[in-house]
Image (spheres, helix red, strand yellow):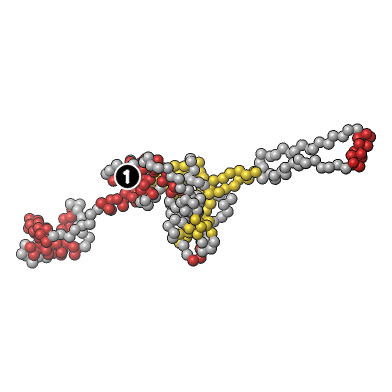
Amino acid sequence: MSKLLKLKSWLTIDEAARRLSISAGEEVTEADILRLALDGHLTLSVYFVNHARGRPARIEPLGAQHFSNAPSFFEFGPPRYMTIEGELLPNKKEVLIYEGDEQKPQHIEGVWDLLMLGAERLDVEDAYQRLTSGPDVELICLGGPLVANEDRTKVFQLLNSYKRSTRPVKPAPRTDKPEISKDMREALDRINAILGPVTITASEEKEPSRWDYETVYYPAEGLPDDSAFVVRTTALRELEEKLLADDAQPEKPLHHSERKSAAQIIATLAAMAGLDLSTPYAADETLRASAATHGLELPSSPETVVKFLKDAAARAGKS
Protein backbone atom coordinates (compact mmCIF):
# COMPACT_ATOMS: atom_id res chain seq x y z
CA MET A 1 0.00 0.00 0.00
CA SER A 2 2.78 2.47 0.88
CA LYS A 3 4.56 1.90 -2.45
CA LEU A 4 1.36 2.32 -4.44
CA LEU A 5 0.49 5.40 -2.40
CA LYS A 6 3.49 7.19 -3.89
CA LEU A 7 1.93 6.86 -7.35
CA LYS A 8 -1.57 8.00 -6.39
CA SER A 9 -2.65 11.60 -6.12
CA TRP A 10 -5.91 10.70 -4.33
CA LEU A 11 -7.61 7.80 -2.56
CA THR A 12 -11.22 6.72 -2.22
CA ILE A 13 -12.82 7.10 1.21
CA ASP A 14 -12.47 3.36 1.79
CA GLU A 15 -8.78 3.39 0.81
CA ALA A 16 -8.14 6.40 3.04
CA ALA A 17 -9.81 4.66 5.99
CA ARG A 18 -7.69 1.52 5.53
CA ARG A 19 -4.51 3.55 5.18
CA LEU A 20 -5.25 5.61 8.28
CA SER A 21 -6.08 2.45 10.22
CA ILE A 22 -2.53 1.25 9.62
CA SER A 23 -0.79 4.53 10.47
CA ALA A 24 -2.99 5.24 13.52
CA GLY A 25 -2.80 1.69 14.84
CA GLU A 26 -6.57 1.47 15.32
CA GLU A 27 -9.63 0.85 13.20
CA VAL A 28 -10.75 3.84 11.13
CA THR A 29 -14.04 3.67 9.21
CA GLU A 30 -15.38 5.61 6.23
CA ALA A 31 -17.67 7.46 8.63
CA ASP A 32 -14.59 8.47 10.66
CA ILE A 33 -13.03 9.98 7.53
CA LEU A 34 -16.14 12.07 6.88
CA ARG A 35 -16.32 13.17 10.52
CA LEU A 36 -12.67 14.21 10.49
CA ALA A 37 -13.43 16.33 7.42
CA LEU A 38 -16.53 17.89 9.02
CA ASP A 39 -14.55 18.72 12.17
CA GLY A 40 -11.77 20.41 10.17
CA HIS A 41 -9.02 17.83 10.74
CA LEU A 42 -8.87 16.52 7.16
CA THR A 43 -9.36 18.18 3.78
CA LEU A 44 -11.97 16.24 1.82
CA SER A 45 -12.14 16.48 -1.96
CA VAL A 46 -14.57 15.57 -4.74
CA TYR A 47 -13.86 13.90 -8.06
CA PHE A 48 -16.09 15.03 -10.94
CA VAL A 49 -16.45 11.82 -12.94
CA ASN A 50 -18.45 13.45 -15.75
CA HIS A 51 -17.21 16.98 -15.13
CA ALA A 52 -19.25 19.89 -13.79
CA ARG A 53 -19.93 23.57 -14.37
CA GLY A 54 -19.30 26.43 -12.01
CA ARG A 55 -19.14 30.16 -11.53
CA PRO A 56 -15.75 31.56 -10.50
CA ALA A 57 -15.52 33.40 -7.20
CA ARG A 58 -13.01 34.60 -4.66
CA ILE A 59 -12.97 34.74 -0.86
CA GLU A 60 -11.96 37.92 0.95
CA PRO A 61 -11.68 38.83 4.65
CA LEU A 62 -14.76 40.75 5.76
CA GLY A 63 -14.13 44.50 5.68
CA ALA A 64 -15.99 47.79 5.67
CA GLN A 65 -15.85 47.92 1.86
CA HIS A 66 -18.26 44.98 1.65
CA PHE A 67 -21.21 46.59 3.41
CA SER A 68 -24.30 47.31 1.28
CA ASN A 69 -27.72 45.71 0.88
CA ALA A 70 -27.16 42.16 -0.34
CA PRO A 71 -28.37 38.80 1.00
CA SER A 72 -26.30 35.97 2.38
CA PHE A 73 -27.43 32.57 1.18
CA PHE A 74 -24.84 30.60 3.13
CA GLU A 75 -27.02 30.13 6.18
CA PHE A 76 -28.13 26.55 6.70
CA GLY A 77 -31.89 26.80 6.87
CA PRO A 78 -34.15 29.68 5.79
CA PRO A 79 -32.01 32.48 4.25
CA ARG A 80 -31.22 35.42 6.52
CA TYR A 81 -30.31 38.74 4.99
CA MET A 82 -27.05 40.48 5.79
CA THR A 83 -25.95 44.00 4.90
CA ILE A 84 -22.84 43.19 2.91
CA GLU A 85 -21.65 43.30 -0.67
CA GLY A 86 -21.17 39.68 -1.61
CA GLU A 87 -22.26 36.79 0.56
CA LEU A 88 -21.18 36.36 4.15
CA LEU A 89 -19.72 32.92 4.82
CA PRO A 90 -20.72 30.90 7.90
CA ASN A 91 -17.51 31.78 9.76
CA LYS A 92 -18.72 35.43 9.77
CA LYS A 93 -15.16 36.50 8.93
CA GLU A 94 -15.00 36.08 5.16
CA VAL A 95 -17.05 37.15 2.15
CA LEU A 96 -17.64 35.24 -1.07
CA ILE A 97 -17.38 37.56 -4.10
CA TYR A 98 -18.67 36.21 -7.40
CA GLU A 99 -16.70 36.82 -10.58
CA GLY A 100 -18.05 36.50 -14.09
CA ASP A 101 -21.59 35.91 -15.35
CA GLU A 102 -23.63 33.13 -13.73
CA GLN A 103 -25.12 32.37 -17.16
CA LYS A 104 -21.64 31.79 -18.64
CA PRO A 105 -20.24 29.06 -16.37
CA GLN A 106 -16.83 27.49 -16.70
CA HIS A 107 -16.04 23.82 -17.25
CA ILE A 108 -14.66 21.99 -14.18
CA GLU A 109 -13.05 18.55 -14.18
CA GLY A 110 -10.80 16.40 -12.03
CA VAL A 111 -10.35 16.61 -8.25
CA TRP A 112 -11.36 19.71 -6.26
CA ASP A 113 -11.26 20.38 -2.52
CA LEU A 114 -14.49 20.94 -0.59
CA LEU A 115 -14.43 24.25 1.31
CA MET A 116 -17.09 23.04 3.79
CA LEU A 117 -18.77 26.44 3.65
CA GLY A 118 -21.80 25.85 1.44
CA ALA A 119 -24.12 23.06 0.29
CA GLU A 120 -21.16 20.68 0.00
CA ARG A 121 -20.95 20.49 3.81
CA LEU A 122 -24.57 19.33 3.96
CA ASP A 123 -23.79 16.57 1.44
CA VAL A 124 -20.90 15.34 3.61
CA GLU A 125 -23.07 15.52 6.75
CA ASP A 126 -25.82 13.59 4.97
CA ALA A 127 -23.35 10.88 3.89
CA TYR A 128 -22.03 10.64 7.48
CA GLN A 129 -25.53 10.32 8.96
CA ARG A 130 -26.43 7.58 6.47
CA LEU A 131 -23.28 5.61 7.35
CA THR A 132 -24.01 5.92 11.07
CA SER A 133 -27.78 5.32 10.77
CA GLY A 134 -28.41 8.89 11.91
CA PRO A 135 -31.31 11.24 11.09
CA ASP A 136 -32.00 12.73 7.68
CA VAL A 137 -30.37 16.08 6.95
CA GLU A 138 -33.19 18.48 6.11
CA LEU A 139 -31.25 21.75 6.13
CA ILE A 140 -30.78 23.66 2.89
CA CYS A 141 -28.18 26.07 1.57
CA LEU A 142 -29.19 28.27 -1.37
CA GLY A 143 -25.61 29.31 -2.11
CA GLY A 144 -24.67 26.02 -3.79
CA PRO A 145 -21.55 23.91 -3.21
CA LEU A 146 -18.15 25.62 -3.08
CA VAL A 147 -14.97 23.93 -4.32
CA ALA A 148 -11.38 25.07 -4.73
CA ASN A 149 -8.13 23.83 -6.22
CA GLU A 150 -5.42 22.51 -3.93
CA ASP A 151 -3.64 25.83 -3.39
CA ARG A 152 -6.92 27.78 -3.07
CA THR A 153 -6.10 30.07 -6.00
CA LYS A 154 -9.35 29.12 -7.78
CA VAL A 155 -12.80 28.92 -6.19
CA PHE A 156 -16.03 27.88 -7.91
CA GLN A 157 -19.71 27.83 -7.03
CA LEU A 158 -21.24 24.74 -8.66
CA LEU A 159 -24.25 25.29 -10.90
CA ASN A 160 -27.20 23.29 -12.21
CA SER A 161 -29.33 24.24 -15.22
CA TYR A 162 -32.74 23.87 -16.84
CA LYS A 163 -34.18 24.58 -20.30
CA ARG A 164 -36.49 27.54 -20.79
CA SER A 165 -38.52 28.18 -23.94
CA THR A 166 -37.69 31.32 -25.90
CA ARG A 167 -40.87 31.28 -28.04
CA PRO A 168 -43.30 34.16 -27.41
CA VAL A 169 -46.44 33.26 -25.51
CA LYS A 170 -49.52 33.19 -27.79
CA PRO A 171 -52.48 35.23 -26.57
CA ALA A 172 -55.53 33.21 -25.66
CA PRO A 173 -58.13 33.03 -28.46
CA ARG A 174 -61.21 35.23 -28.14
CA THR A 175 -64.33 33.41 -27.12
CA ASP A 176 -66.79 36.26 -27.61
CA LYS A 177 -68.26 36.83 -31.09
CA PRO A 178 -68.35 40.43 -32.32
CA GLU A 179 -71.75 41.93 -33.14
CA ILE A 180 -72.44 42.32 -36.91
CA SER A 181 -74.72 45.18 -37.99
CA LYS A 182 -77.72 44.65 -40.29
CA ASP A 183 -76.08 46.63 -43.13
CA MET A 184 -72.85 44.53 -42.84
CA ARG A 185 -74.83 41.29 -42.97
CA GLU A 186 -76.70 42.43 -46.12
CA ALA A 187 -73.37 43.35 -47.78
CA LEU A 188 -71.92 39.92 -47.01
CA ASP A 189 -75.02 38.25 -48.45
CA ARG A 190 -74.62 40.19 -51.74
CA ILE A 191 -70.92 39.19 -51.96
CA ASN A 192 -71.79 35.55 -51.38
CA ALA A 193 -74.46 35.71 -54.08
CA ILE A 194 -71.93 36.97 -56.63
CA LEU A 195 -68.79 35.04 -55.67
CA GLY A 196 -70.30 32.04 -54.01
CA PRO A 197 -69.56 30.87 -50.51
CA VAL A 198 -66.10 31.92 -49.35
CA THR A 199 -64.28 30.05 -46.57
CA ILE A 200 -61.42 31.84 -44.92
CA THR A 201 -58.99 29.57 -43.05
CA ALA A 202 -56.22 30.62 -40.78
CA SER A 203 -52.73 29.94 -42.04
CA GLU A 204 -51.10 26.93 -40.48
CA GLU A 205 -49.05 27.71 -37.43
CA LYS A 206 -45.36 27.49 -38.08
CA GLU A 207 -43.87 24.29 -36.73
CA PRO A 208 -41.88 25.21 -33.60
CA SER A 209 -38.17 24.52 -33.75
CA ARG A 210 -36.78 22.07 -31.24
CA TRP A 211 -33.99 24.61 -30.61
CA ASP A 212 -36.37 27.30 -29.37
CA TYR A 213 -35.03 27.26 -25.80
CA GLU A 214 -32.22 28.63 -23.68
CA THR A 215 -30.19 27.10 -20.83
CA VAL A 216 -30.58 28.85 -17.50
CA TYR A 217 -28.00 28.24 -14.75
CA TYR A 218 -28.56 28.53 -10.99
CA PRO A 219 -26.69 27.47 -7.79
CA ALA A 220 -26.80 23.68 -7.44
CA GLU A 221 -28.68 22.08 -4.57
CA GLY A 222 -25.68 19.87 -3.86
CA LEU A 223 -22.78 18.02 -5.42
CA PRO A 224 -23.48 16.16 -8.69
CA ASP A 225 -24.90 12.67 -8.26
CA ASP A 226 -22.12 11.30 -10.48
CA SER A 227 -19.31 12.74 -8.33
CA ALA A 228 -17.35 10.89 -5.63
CA PHE A 229 -15.74 11.87 -2.33
CA VAL A 230 -11.96 11.34 -2.34
CA VAL A 231 -8.96 12.29 -0.18
CA ARG A 232 -5.76 13.71 -1.65
CA THR A 233 -2.68 11.75 -0.56
CA THR A 234 -1.07 15.04 0.50
CA ALA A 235 -4.01 15.76 2.83
CA LEU A 236 -3.81 12.25 4.27
CA ARG A 237 -0.08 12.58 4.94
CA GLU A 238 -0.66 15.89 6.72
CA LEU A 239 -3.15 14.19 9.03
CA GLU A 240 -0.79 11.27 9.65
CA GLU A 241 2.02 13.67 10.58
CA LYS A 242 -0.30 15.48 12.97
CA LEU A 243 -1.32 12.21 14.64
CA LEU A 244 2.32 11.14 15.01
CA ALA A 245 3.25 14.56 16.42
CA ASP A 246 0.44 14.34 18.97
CA ASP A 247 1.67 10.89 20.05
CA ALA A 248 5.26 12.06 20.52
CA GLN A 249 5.91 12.85 24.17
CA PRO A 250 8.13 15.85 24.97
CA GLU A 251 11.58 14.79 26.13
CA LYS A 252 11.96 15.21 29.88
CA PRO A 253 15.21 16.57 31.33
CA LEU A 254 17.38 14.00 33.05
CA HIS A 255 16.84 13.64 36.78
CA HIS A 256 19.87 14.32 38.97
CA SER A 257 20.31 10.60 39.68
CA GLU A 258 19.95 9.76 35.95
CA ARG A 259 22.55 12.36 35.01
CA LYS A 260 24.93 10.94 37.63
CA SER A 261 24.43 7.42 36.27
CA ALA A 262 25.03 8.59 32.67
CA ALA A 263 28.27 10.31 33.71
CA GLN A 264 29.47 7.17 35.50
CA ILE A 265 28.72 5.04 32.41
CA ILE A 266 30.61 7.47 30.15
CA ALA A 267 33.57 7.53 32.54
CA THR A 268 33.67 3.72 32.65
CA LEU A 269 33.51 3.42 28.84
CA ALA A 270 36.21 6.09 28.49
CA ALA A 271 38.48 4.16 30.87
CA MET A 272 37.91 0.95 28.89
CA ALA A 273 38.77 2.75 25.63
CA GLY A 274 41.77 4.57 27.11
CA LEU A 275 40.12 7.93 26.45
CA ASP A 276 41.58 10.85 28.40
CA LEU A 277 38.68 12.84 29.86
CA SER A 278 40.97 15.57 31.22
CA THR A 279 41.23 16.94 27.69
CA PRO A 280 37.55 16.89 26.62
CA TYR A 281 38.00 18.63 23.24
CA ALA A 282 40.72 16.21 22.17
CA ALA A 283 38.53 13.37 23.41
CA ASP A 284 35.69 14.72 21.28
CA GLU A 285 37.88 14.53 18.15
CA THR A 286 38.85 10.95 19.01
CA LEU A 287 35.21 10.00 19.54
CA ARG A 288 34.18 11.54 16.20
CA ALA A 289 36.83 9.65 14.30
CA SER A 290 35.78 6.37 15.95
CA ALA A 291 32.09 7.10 15.32
CA ALA A 292 32.75 7.66 11.62
CA THR A 293 34.60 4.34 11.42
CA HIS A 294 31.62 2.48 12.87
CA GLY A 295 28.96 4.39 10.92
CA LEU A 296 27.68 6.20 14.00
CA GLU A 297 26.74 9.85 14.42
CA LEU A 298 27.47 12.18 17.32
CA PRO A 299 25.73 15.50 18.07
CA SER A 300 26.81 18.09 15.50
CA SER A 301 27.96 20.56 18.14
CA PRO A 302 31.24 19.63 19.92
CA GLU A 303 30.05 21.65 22.92
CA THR A 304 27.29 19.10 23.55
CA VAL A 305 29.77 16.21 23.66
CA VAL A 306 32.29 18.18 25.71
CA LYS A 307 29.60 19.00 28.29
CA PHE A 308 28.93 15.31 28.91
CA LEU A 309 32.66 14.46 28.93
CA LYS A 310 33.39 17.16 31.54
CA ASP A 311 30.53 15.89 33.67
CA ALA A 312 31.87 12.34 33.40
CA ALA A 313 35.38 13.50 34.31
CA ALA A 314 34.03 15.27 37.38
CA ARG A 315 32.14 12.14 38.42
CA ALA A 316 35.30 10.08 37.95
CA GLY A 317 37.39 12.55 39.95
CA LYS A 318 39.59 13.51 37.00
CA SER A 319 38.60 17.15 36.52
Q: Quadrant of residue 30?
A: top left
Q: Is residue 157 left or right of residue 315?
A: right
Say which element carries label 1.
Answer: helix
Q: Residues within 10 Å of mark 1 (few under 14, many from 20)?
A: many
Identify the residue shown where x is 91% and y is 32%: 196
Question: With 313 as the anchor, is 181 left or right in this view?
Answer: right
Please state, as top left, top right, bottom left or bottom right, where the N terminus lies in the image: top left
Name above or below for residue 136 compared with residue 195. Answer: below
Residue at far left of view:
317
Residue 144 visible in the current orientation: yes
In the rendering, at what x and y percent does residue 315 appear? 7, 63
Q: Which residue is mark 1?
A: 20
At 29% from the left and 42% from the top, the residue drawn is: 27
**Rendering coords of residue 243 (x, y %):** 29, 50
Give whichever of 281, 178 is nearer the camera.
178
Viewer can see residue 10: no
Q: Quadrant of residue 314?
A: bottom left
Residue depicted at x 13% and y 60%: 255
Relative to 26, is 78 above or below? Answer: below
Judge left or right: residue 299 versus residue 274: right
